Amino acid sequence: MNSTFTKILRIVLGLGLLFFGLSKLINLHIMPTHIYTGDAAIFIDSLSSTGYILKVIGILEIFIGLLLLINKWVSFALLLLAPITVNILLFHLFLDTPGLLVALVITILNVILIYKHWKVYKPLFH
């Protein structure tokens, strides 16, 4: 569970979540971003107009990222991240294909780390 490979993946995912979570709370213009168009723009605008959804997701991403970085409750953090990952993947798959690569990376990292911690989750399926 704590191989060097797993540690690197955990840290990369944690840093990514920390960055994307912070970018939802404060406007970070470090990374060039594409402009959402069509249905993706409508969807993001509707989430933004609620005033809280993107902030809650950002806070969760920061929390999960910090747990992964400090190596505490990693199994719990990965479980919390699973539904967020599914939604990120589906959003980019159906509404915003230019961002699909990042969504796939997040999904693959999460799946690999869940697999590496599978013995913790196994009792959930008995």
Image (spheres, rainbow, N blue to C red):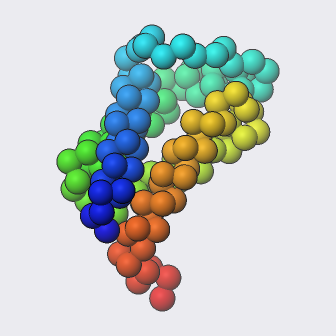
Task: Judge by depth and name the residue closer to the eye, 46 or 91.
Answer: 91
- Residue 108 relative to residue 41: left or right: left
Q: Residue 14: image x %, image y %?
A: 35, 42
- In which quadrant is the N terminus drawn? bottom left
State the count of labels.
0
Query: Given the current orientation, which residue lies at the most extreme top position?
Result: 29
Q: Residue at x 30, y 63 (%)?
A: 3
Q: Residue 83: image x %, image y %?
A: 53, 53
Q: Is residue 21 visible?
A: no
Q: Residue at x 41, y 35 (%)?
A: 16
Q: Residue at x 43, y 80 (%)?
A: 122
- Residue 36 relative to residue 75: left or right: right
Q: Residue at x 42, y 60 (%)?
A: 113
Q: Is residue 32 visible?
A: yes
Task: Judge by depth and name the residue closer to the eye, 69 or 52.
Answer: 69
- Residue 100 relative to residue 53: left or right: right
Task: Judge by depth and name the residue closer to the eye, 42 or 119.
Answer: 119
Q: Residue 65: image x %, image y %?
A: 33, 42
Residue 21: quadrant of the picture:
top left
Query: Given the current orientation, which residue lies at the most extreme bottom position?
Result: 126
Query: Given the current orientation, which residue lies at the most extreme right position?
Result: 38
Q: Residue 116: image x %, image y %?
A: 40, 68
Q: Is residue 44 above or below residue 4?
A: above
Task: Judge by depth and name the residue closer to the eye, 25 or 66.
Answer: 66
Q: Is residue 107 above or below residue 118?
A: above
